[in-house]
Amino acid sequence: MLKITILVVGRVREEYIKRGIEKFKKWLQPYCRLDIVQVEEKGGGKKKQTEEIDKVREEEGEKLLKALDEKDYVIILDMQGKPISSEGLARSLANLQNRGLSSVTFIIGGPFGLSPAVIETGDYILSLSPMTFTHEMVQLILLEQLYRAFKIMRGEPYHY
């Protein structure tokens, strides 16, 4: 069974998003082993100068890299990445499994994005959309897309 880790900067604060995340975590149990690992957010919503933003990204990046398992296939979520369809995500996950990979980590940055050092660790850079979402929403959207991908891989209906 594929192990999926979602490595994210910051915690989820909105209750409705927490409920959605819990729902998809439960629904994903038959398909994969799922772990969501949160590292401390340094940025917050404060206005910062460019140098301060770079420092925040760097500090958060160091924590993400420490939490990363070197054996994992790493997918970075970034709006500058490549878009993929739900069917494409399903094919990609199936291909990774067929190659013998057992562990995939998705990395979601904080309010100021990811440091270059984290982006460089990615085996693939994925864009969920050209629009900007909070890290909380990205977690929920990613979980929903993972659920769809596993349903597609098994030939099960997924349009709910």
Image (cartoon, rainbow, N blue to C red):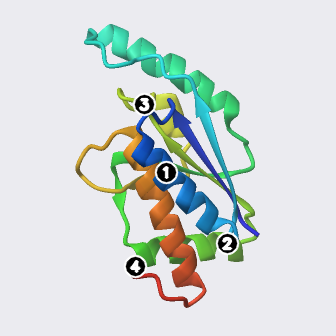
- Examine the rendering and report whether any part of residue 111 can be seen: yes
What's the residue at 75%, 49% (across, down)?
Answer: 71
* Amino acid type at image mark 2: Tyr
Q: Quadrant of the N terminus?
A: bottom right
Image side of residue 33 versus residue 158, left or right: right
The three-letter code of the residue at mark 3 reads Gly
Work out which quarter of the rendered image holds the C terminus and state it.
bottom left
Residue occupied by mark 2:
31
Q: Whole-Å distance between the Cαs marked 1 and 3? A: 20 Å
On screen, residue 77 above or below 85? above
**Mark 3 highlights which residue?**
110
Front: mark 1 or 3: 1
- Mark 4 burial class by Cα count in 10 Å: few <14, some 14-19, many 20+: few
Q: Position of residue 52 (x, y in %)?
A: 36, 9
Nearest to viewer (mark 2 / mark 4): 4
- How far apart marks 3 and 2 lie (CA) works out to 28 Å
Whichever of callouts 3 and 4 sits on the residue coming sooner in the sequence is 3
Check disc 1: other Cα within 10 Å, few if <14, some if 14-19, many if 20+: few
Dot in front, 2 or 1: 1
Position in image of residue 97 (x %, y %): 69, 72
Q: Kindly report which numbered mark, 4 or 1, lies closer to the viewer in this rendering.
A: 1
Nearer the observer, disc 3 or disc 4?
4
Confirm whether residue 124 shows in the render: no
147 lies left or right of 14: right
Residue 139, compared with residue 49, is above or below; it is below
Specify the label residue 160 is tagged with: 4
Kindly identify which residue carries mark 1: 19
Residue type at tag 4: Tyr
Pointer 1 or 3: first along the chain = 1
Q: Disc 3, disc 2: CB below 8 Å?
A: no
Label 4, label 1: how far apart the Cα atoms are: 17 Å
Horizontal side of 150 relative to 115 (left or right) equals right
